[in-house]
Image: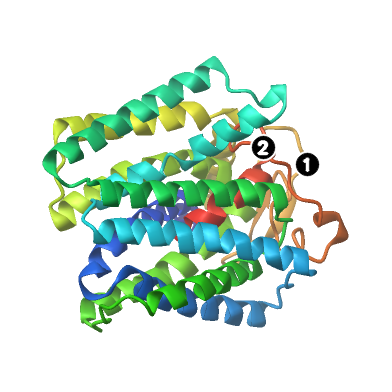
Amino acid sequence: MQPAQQRALLIGAMPALFVLIWSTGFIVARYGMPHAPPLKFLAWRFALSALCFVLWVRVSGAAWPQGRAQWRHLAVTGVLMHAGYLGGVWAAVRLGIGAGTVALIVGLQPVLTAVWISRTGSLSERVSARQWIGLALGFTGLLLVVGHRLGSGEVTVANLGLALFALLCITAGTLYQKQHVARCDVRTASAVQLLAALAVTLPLALLEPAPVQWHPQLLGAMAWSVVVLTLGGSSLLYLLIQRGAATAVTSLLYLVPPCTALMAWLLFGESLSLSVLVGLALTAAGVAWWFVRREATHEWGDLCRRVHKVSRRACSVDVSRGAEPRPVGDLHGGIRIESPSALDTPQAHRCNDPQSQRPSAARPTGLGPAPSTVDRDTFQRGYLS
């Protein structure tokens, strides 16, 4: 296989690889649970991940947020979207809920966010009949899965409450970020958010009586969480945003709960009955029915054309929307990839840019905002799962 063809395959595999990495976040929680209490594990993870991001920012020269307000807003989102969300997920898994079940519950976050914004926003953001059908499908699937797990004793009031707490935290964090957080570099934003999450998690972790057992299994889970989920996931996110395919990736994210359930079945023997499979399929179909729009179709077409062009050593892509292509840099060996829009490059989202200090519009994911708005809000919480 020629090097250009290998590069083309790599580009084409990026979205699916990103989704696969995200799905492992729930598996890692189950894998590391026997050897560490949840908050102590997360405190270590936040500390090591924040250190990695600080070093990355130092090497890359990315701009830090300017002004106390932006630091405060990022800190609030960090507490909600990392400490609250991940703390709830890990504590629920610690109390016996399955990785696939908790992934399904928190996977409804985009729908809840869109419903809230549509009910409190303008008339143009109201929920359509099509979207209500998707919402009904999603919650029907959730009820099927949770009902089956309740009957088997896996889901209890305690672990279900923690999973719902995680869902509320990630929903509130997303809404707060849409309303208050200005556009900024994803690396500096992640560093600030992780430091804020560490500041909240560490004191609570010290109250946990169980010690950390530095077992090889725990070390593997920690290394995967920091290196693969945090650094690998964020790097893939950065590349995908630059290439304008993140809305297409958003449509794939609705396969995360089924993917997680399948991995949990293979690794931990979690049951996959017919009702669970039907529930997972209904939930994935319902959320996809809500969100999958023409934007994702256009971006998949653009991405496929780029893969074809790269394999033929072309230097530009055919932009289906008629916009002038804008280069976003070289990718491996001098093959230039171009994007129909300037999306979330470090230069485009400096926190000290006066034009970026206005909070991003509070619009629901998938209901028509520009891809750059959707991408950052959707993924900045997800790739650290």
Of mark 2 and mark 1, the one earlier in the sequence is: 1
Frontmost residue, 47 versus 329:
47
Q: Secondary structure at mark 2?
A: loop
- Amino acid type at circle 1 is Glu
Location of residue 6 by image quarter: bottom left
Q: Compared to 324, does 43 lie above or below? A: below
Question: Horizontally, is 356 left or right of 379 in the view?
Answer: right
User: Which x, y percent locates residue 365?
Assistant: 59, 38
User: Which x, y percent locates residue 152?
Assistant: 12, 41
Colouring chosen for the image of the structure: rainbow
Residue at the (66%, 39%) spot, across then down: 318
Quadrant in the picture for the C terminus: bottom left
Residue at the (46%, 26%) spot, across then down: 289
- Amino acid type at circle 2 is Arg
Q: Which mark is residue 363?
A: 2
Q: Secondary structure at mark 1?
A: loop
Q: Compared to 125, does 314 lie above or below? A: below
Question: Horizontally, is 287 left or right of 79 in the view?
Answer: left
Q: Which mark is residue 324?
A: 1
Question: Horizontally, is 108 left or right of 245 in the view?
Answer: left
Say whether residue 16 is visible: no
User: Which x, y percent locates residue 118?
Assistant: 62, 29
Location of residue 182 by image quarter: bottom right
Q: Compared to 20, does 224 lie above or below? A: below
Q: Which mark is residue 107?
A: none
Q: CA distance from mark 2 to mark 1?
A: 26 Å
Q: Compared to 68, does 4 lie above or below? A: above
